[in-house]
Image (tube, rainbow, N blue to C red):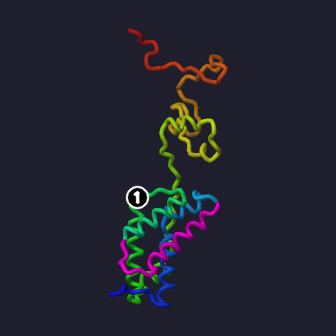
Amino acid sequence: MEPKRLTAESAPVFQEGISLILTRWSALTAAVENEWGGRDSRGKASAICTDVFSFFTASRAEPLYIDDLENILEEGLLSLNTLVEDGSIEEVAEKLMIMHEECLEGNYQSVEKLRTTNPPPVAHVRPSNDEDDEEEEDEDDSMSGDSAANMIVDVPNSQSSLNPVGMPTDEPKPNHSAGSEDGWVVISSRKNKGRRN
């Protein structure tokens, strides 16, 4: 028995549904907005939509497997230099499989629901850099402005958020004349001051 195929009426509706689901996927949206895949990130996202539609419409004798669809979605995100481990690939794949089954039966309710609802606000996702310390040390001299924006800065206690308006505190001021040529200043500990046993 040959598997069911999308009709001429249901194919464009299903294609719109694919687009609606993928444009609401926060991982894909963040990758496109931040151009993690380069200047052609929008084109790569469009290619993911095309690949997904082709997955469902290609003529084949075997049934469609959700694992194959998940692989297409994962490869698409990797083309955008995005690795997702939050379970959203599986969630998106499941929604697409359900929508495909509904469109095969002429039921466009899920597509209609997506059309009428506003997309959820996009979470602002920042790329993480999980490289080894050795690699980071090698790259310290070649950091670009983008990389510098992702750095974590240690704030000294005297400048922490406990004193946000810069009001005077009881902490001693460092002696700037004791600083070395490279700008580092040695600050003594108040913990044992005057209490030597």
Which sits in the foreground, 185 or 104?
104
Residue occupying the far left of the picture: 1
Q: Is residue 51 magenta?
A: yes
According to the picture, the residue beneath numbered tag 1 turns out to be: 86
On screen, 147 above or below 57? above
User: Looking at the figure, which quarter contains the N terminus?
Assistant: bottom left
Which sits in the foreground, 135 or 177?
135
- Residue 34 figure quarter: bottom right
Percent coordinates x, y for residue 175 in the rendering: 61, 19
Count all numbered tags in the image, as a single digit. 1
On screen, 99 above or below 151? below
Give the residue drawn at x 53%, y 60%. Answer: 79
Q: Which residues are magenta?
A: 39-65
The amino acid pointed to by label 1 is Asp
Q: Is residue 38 magenta?
A: no
Which sits in the foreground, 174 or 15?
15
Percent coordinates x, y for residue 20 in the rendering: 50, 75
Which sits in the foreground, 166 or 10?
10
Q: Is residue 65 left or right of residue 32?
A: left
On screen, 150 above or below 10? above
Q: Is residue 69 left or right of residue 1?
A: right
- Residue 62 figure quarter: bottom left
> What is the magenta segment's predominant secondary structure?
helix
Percent coordinates x, y for residue 149 in the rendering: 60, 45
Percent coordinates x, y for residue 57 in the rendering: 46, 81
User: Looking at the figure, which quarter contains the C terminus?
Assistant: top left
Check disc 1 and report its element: helix, strand or loop: loop
Give the residue drawn at x 35%, y 78%. Answer: 63
**Badge 1 local density, few (<14 within 10 Å), some, or many (20+)?**
few
